[in-house]
Image (cartoon, helix red, strand yellow):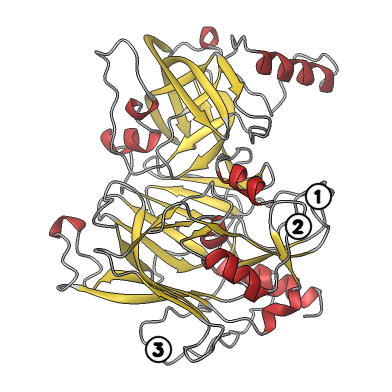
Amino acid sequence: MHRFSSLLRTCIFITVEAVGIYQIPLSDHYQTIPQRKQHSARNDNPNHQPRYPQEQQHILIPLHGHNASQSRINLRDTALILYSLPITLGTPPQPFSLALSLSPTPLFVPSASCWSVYCKSLRHQDSSSSSNQSTQSPYFQTYNSTLSSTTHPTNLTSTHEFANVLFAGPITFDRLALGPIIIPSQPFISAERIEPQTYFHWYYEYSGVLGLAYPSHSLSSSSPSSSEKDLPTPWKALIDKNLLSKNIFTLVLPSGPRDFSTPRTNGLLTLGDIPTEHAEKKFIYLPLHPHTPKSWTVSVTSLSFGEKGDSRALHQEFTTSGGAKASFETVSPFILLPGNWAPSMKRLIGATEPDGFYWEFPCENRNFLPDLVFEFLVRKDEDASSEFGWDPEDGFMKKEISLSPYEYTFEVTGGNVPDIPPIGCRIGFEDSEDEGKIVLGWPFLQNFVGVFDFDMGRVGCMYSYLFYFLFDLFFIKRGG
């Protein structure tokens, strides 16, 4: 299982479908849920972020008439453990489902002229499943340059490995649509060769990857060939071309108990602003780490699990300059922790090694388990830009963000997926390969509205209202 989770950790991706956004006050259909008592006894701590705000909660419904400098796009579960969103390439538009990543991943999609054995096998599956109809399967969407009037081929090529699969082909420029926002000429890899590198890989139910990494690279057109590091992401194009009202994007991942057979569709990616239902709420803004200012990486100064004085409690201070590096990543199905944190937490939580992806534990253990507390370094003046420099002795303070047992674990319901029991509770902790590195994957991000602010060099976090509504709804239904 350890080898399996290590392989799974390298398989990163997401998919795309649906459009639309949802925004109806719950009072129209449900009674407002009263604020629950904090799980932990930290109510008197001024540095602790409150978990259950009292403001009106919301769910999401389709909206129309978006500003052209803003875009709201649905996110949904895909490929069991990832998230996807819809985009189009070319004129007329060719639709694709793309995995969403916060890492520096270039945009790539399969080419209609892909000649590798893997592409041929997928085409054969599509033709069989569609009864020889001309409609292409949504799970193997290919780019056909001959059908687009806005395509611009180049003599450059690029190769990129993702989810243990190699993608190689020419770099092409074409029109990219992210909802109502149009990038007139976006470079991407039109993959003519797609080859799995290992028996175990994670490339299905999505065509390519949309990277929203902090921009730091540009394409050198003078070079006869190019590596993926030289290929600018769509996020960089949005910034360079001033296509957004603000150079930020907001993530609300799908929430509620995870059903592996029925994808949740209540996630939301907002480009160019904070969604109106969250715009006036209080965020904790985390400045980017001083040693990695060109990535969505922040500073963690300590980790705690359990109260002081408890012999079973875990605590670690990170004393290096700027603290431990904690990177946000939507395609990581784990929270990766340094040292012996992951095995120690599995033991204290009472988890057992399963046959599938995640360690499982008795759901009733959540009633007495402690919070997992991350202590972040934040600016005293949260509106100060990262350009003002970094001096831990001046202008900074420490801020706690804690996850209750209902937040650092997740519930699995229903499903007809091999090796995954139909119901139960899971944890997503694994070891970090770097002693000073933490990865805050979706088991962390699913609890928050996340604001990724390029101009201010920071990431904002606020507990997601939708998550708590859905949790309470299912909790009540199950008689908890």
Q: Nearer the viewer, residue 205 or 354?
A: 354
* Location of residue 377 by image quarter: bottom left
Cβ atoms at labels 2 and 3 below 8 Å apart: no
**Upstream in the sequence, badge 2 or badge 3?**
3
Q: For mark 3, give the secondary structure.
A: loop
Question: Does residue 135 show up?
Answer: no
Badge 1 amino acid: Asp
User: Dot 1, crowdedness within 10 Å: few (<14), some or many (≥20)?
Assistant: few
Tell me if residue 188 comes above or below residue 380 in the rendering: above
Residue placed at 43% from the left, 42% from the top?
103
Q: Nearer the viewer, mark 1 or mark 3?
A: 1
* Residue type indicated by callout 3: Asn
Q: Where is residue 85? Give x, y as percent.
A: 57, 40
Q: Are marks 2 and 1 in contact (CB under 8 Å)?
A: yes
Residue 51: x and y in percent read: 51, 78
Real-space Cα separation, disc 1 to disc 3, in angstroms? 43 Å
Q: Which mark is residue 439?
A: none
Let me know if residue 307 appears in the view: yes
Secondary structure, mark 2, is loop
| Residue of label 1 | 419
Residue 354 is labelled as 2
Quadrant housing the C terminus = bottom right
For mark 3, what is the residue? Answer: 45
